[in-house]
Each structure stands twice: as C-alpha cells, then as structure tokens.
Image (cartoon, rainbow, N blue to C red):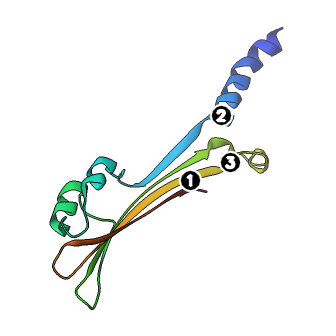
C-alpha cells in the first residue's frame, strides 16, 4: 500500500509530462480583417505597413517594384520528445504556418496578394 502511494505522484507527473506541449511562435499573427480590405491598384505600401506593421522581409526589385513578405508560424512540441526512448513513440512536433506576399509597383500601389498556409 505504501509503495503505490509513493508511486502515484510520480505516475501523475509522468502523465503530465507525456501530454504537455510547448509552443514556439515566429512572426506576428496576420490581421485577416485588414488584409481583406486591401485592393490591387488602390492600396498603398504605406497603408499595408500601417495596418500590419513591419514585414518579415522586404525586397526591392530592379524595375522599382517592392515585395513585402509577412509570415507567422507556430510549432507545438510534445514534451515527450525530450524523454529518451519515449521520444521514439511520441507525437513529435506540429507546425502551422501562414504567409502573405504583397507586390507593389514603382508607384507604390498594390499589384498582387499571394497567400500560403499549411501544416507540417
């Protein structure tokens, strides 16, 4: 009886460790409501930056066009992946990502919006 009483906290701790997750985030969540209002030929680069903040990256093309790239990624890692031997049977990590690329002409007006999202 005493042995099972001593093992109960250890069993509970092990159960918690095997079911817990750690989440890592990269970038900022994309503001879908703001993106829905952007119109090619009308919306300016300055408006996009004002609404979404600084992009993840900016590229200047030789023709004077500019590309703003925004991305957001979350990765959930099961804590069981950190336990030797158990990690062979653990769920591992799940990553969700979304990105949006805005291309602006030399006049600073939006040309195209390209979205990408998925899971790994």
Image location of residue 31, percent across then percent down: 31, 50
Residue at 65% in and 34% down: 19
Q: Nearer the viewer, residue 120 or 103?
A: 103
Tell me which corner region of the image, top left, top right, bottom left or bottom right, holds residue 51.
bottom left
Please name which of the two marks, 1 or 3, marks the residue nearer to the observer. Answer: 1
Q: CA distance from mark 1 to mark 3?
A: 15 Å
Q: Secondary structure at mark 2?
A: helix
Q: Quadrant of the N terminus?
A: top right
Does 116 sit left or right of 64 as displayed?
A: right
Does 94 sit left or right of 58 as displayed?
A: right
Near mark 3 (Cα within 10 A), the count class, few <14, some 14-19 or many ≥20, is some
Please give the residue where the numbered disc 1 appears in the rendered image: 95
Give residue 47's mark: none
Q: CA distance from mark 2 to mark 1?
A: 17 Å
Image location of residue 17, percent across then percent down: 65, 34
Q: Quadrant of the C terminus?
A: bottom right
Q: Is residue 22 above or below residue 30?
A: above
Q: Nearer the viewer, residue 31 or 85?
A: 31
Q: CA distance from mark 3 to mark 2?
A: 11 Å
Tell me which corner region of the image, top left, top right, bottom left or bottom right, holds residue 59.
bottom left
Q: Closer to the N terminus: mark 2 or mark 1?
A: 2
Q: Are marks 2 and 1 in contact (CB under 8 Å)?
A: no
Image location of residue 96, percent across then percent down: 53, 52
Please give the residue where the numbered disc 2 appears in the rendered image: 19
Near mark 1 (Cα within 10 A), the count class, few <14, some 14-19 or many ≥20, is some
Q: Are marks 3 and 2 in contact (CB under 8 Å)?
A: no
């Amino acid at each position: 009886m005493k042995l099972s009483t001593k093992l109960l906290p250890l069993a509970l701790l092990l159960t918690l460790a095997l079911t817990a997750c750690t989440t890592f985030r990269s970038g900022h969540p994309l503001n879908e409501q703001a993106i829905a209002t952007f119109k090619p030929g009308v919306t300016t680069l300055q408006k996009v930056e004002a609404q979404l903040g600084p992009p993840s990256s900016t590229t200047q093309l030789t023709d004077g066009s500019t590309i703003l790239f925004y991305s957001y990624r979350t990765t959930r890692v099961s804590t069981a992946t950190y336990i030797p031997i158990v990690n062979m049977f653990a769920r591992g990590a799940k990553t969700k990502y979304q990105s949006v690329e805005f291309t602006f002409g030399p006049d600073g007006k939006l040309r195209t919006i390209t979205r990408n999202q998925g899971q790994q």
